Image: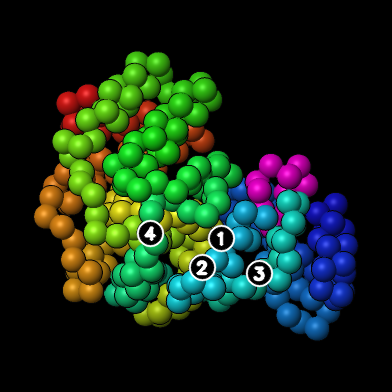
């Protein structure tokens, strides 16, 4: 059924004939296939016939990064709410050998700035909407549009206990005790974990599945640290290119990690709830 759906989409969007389509690993949103066109060209097809994964927003984010940064991301050939066709990028190598290159790419991305925090439209993390109203204060944006927002949806999902929800709300009112306003809002990828990075040798070939907005770039570094996406070579090279303010590794990375932890509570519950509780205790909440 999926192959027929992809074939019809390829024909309508690209005017090409589909030769084959086989499932690919990775991707927790929709179904992901490597499709081969009749002329031998490989493409990636994401299928969501229920229209719940907001594939059009993913296409927008990839296009925004291509137009506004040098971060390598796949080119989008076609997008709708049910089908996304994009460039197949070779990867498959260990990303650990490309940590220095990843640092250079992300440091450059964080040099793309805006006049406020947020974005010109709402984006996604996974299939969860990320609200991005332009906000002059990073502390206010992180409080209202990240911590309080995702704690509420995690609570409504039934996976965040009421007591922890209340403790997140209490901590959110004390953010001024722990974080300050950065120099400028920076464009971030927003979802840098190993499954979203492709590499060959010592070079990154693509970053996948972005969750973009303009933020304090420390939240990107906190995400990378939380999931061990990259290690010491990454952080060492990044610090050579962009300063990392004192106190990040000791304190703020744990605070910023609350956002992706709560996102994972929303999706999965389980041990991520325990991780949220540990983080709240670290900050006296």
Q: Residue at x 76, y 65 (%)?
A: 21
Residue 133 shown in magenta? no
* Gap in angstroms between the C-alphas marked 3 and 4: 28 Å
**Left or right of 67, for residue 249:** left
Residue 48 shown in magenta? yes
Q: Position of residue 66 (x, y in %)?
A: 54, 72
The residue wearing badge 3 is 76
The reply to whether residue 195 is visible in this rendering is no
- Mark 4 neighbour class, 10 Å CA radius: few under 14, some 14 to 19, many 20 or more: few
The first of marks 4 and 2 along the sequence is 2
- Mark 2 neighbour class, 10 Å CA radius: few under 14, some 14 to 19, many 20 or more: many
Cβ atoms at labels 2 and 1 below 8 Å apart: yes
Magenta span main SS:
loop
The residue wearing badge 2 is 65
**Left or right of 18, for residue 215:** left
Write the start and end of the magenta stretch as one range. Answer: 46-55
Out of 22 and 84, give the one closest to the viewer: 84
Dot 4: element: loop
Q: Nearer the viewer, mark 3 or mark 1?
A: 1
The residue wearing badge 1 is 61
């Amino acid at each position: 059924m999926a192959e027929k759906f992809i074939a019809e989409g390829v024909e309508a969007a690209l005017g090409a004939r589909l030769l084959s389509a086989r499932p690919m690993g990775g991707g927790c949103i929709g179904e992901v296939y490597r499709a081969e066109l009749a002329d031998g060209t490989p493409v990636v097809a994401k299928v969501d016939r229920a229209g719940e994964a907001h594939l059009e927003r993913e296409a927008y984010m990839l296009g925004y990064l291509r137009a506004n940064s040098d971060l390598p991301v796949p080119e989008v050939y076609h997008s709708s709410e049910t089908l996304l066709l994009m460039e197949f990028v070779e990867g498959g190598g260990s990303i650990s050998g490309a940590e220095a290159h990843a640092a250079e790419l992300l440091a450059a991305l964080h040099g793309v700035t805006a006049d406020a925090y947020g974005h010109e439209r709402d984006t996604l993390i996974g299939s969860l909407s990320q609200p991005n109203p332009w906000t002059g204060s990073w502390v206010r944006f992180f409080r209202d549009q990240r911590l309080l927002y995702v704690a509420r949806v995690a609570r409504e999902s039934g996976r965040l206990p009421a007591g922890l929800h209340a403790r997140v709300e209490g901590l959110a009112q004390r953010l001024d005790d722990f974080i300050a306003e950065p120099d400028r809002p920076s464009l971030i990828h927003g979802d840098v974990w190993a499954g979203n990075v492709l590499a060959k040798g010592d070079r990154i070939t693509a970053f996948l599945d972005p969750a973009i907005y303009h933020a304090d770039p420390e939240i990107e570094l906190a995400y990378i640290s939380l999931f061990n996406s990259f290690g010491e070579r990454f952080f060492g090279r990044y610090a050579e290119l962009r300063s990392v303010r004192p106190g990040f590794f000791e304190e703020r990375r744990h605070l910023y990690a609350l956002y992706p932890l709560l996102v994972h509570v929303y999706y999965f519950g389980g041990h991520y709830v325990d991780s949220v509780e540990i983080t709240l205790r670290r900050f006296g909440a």
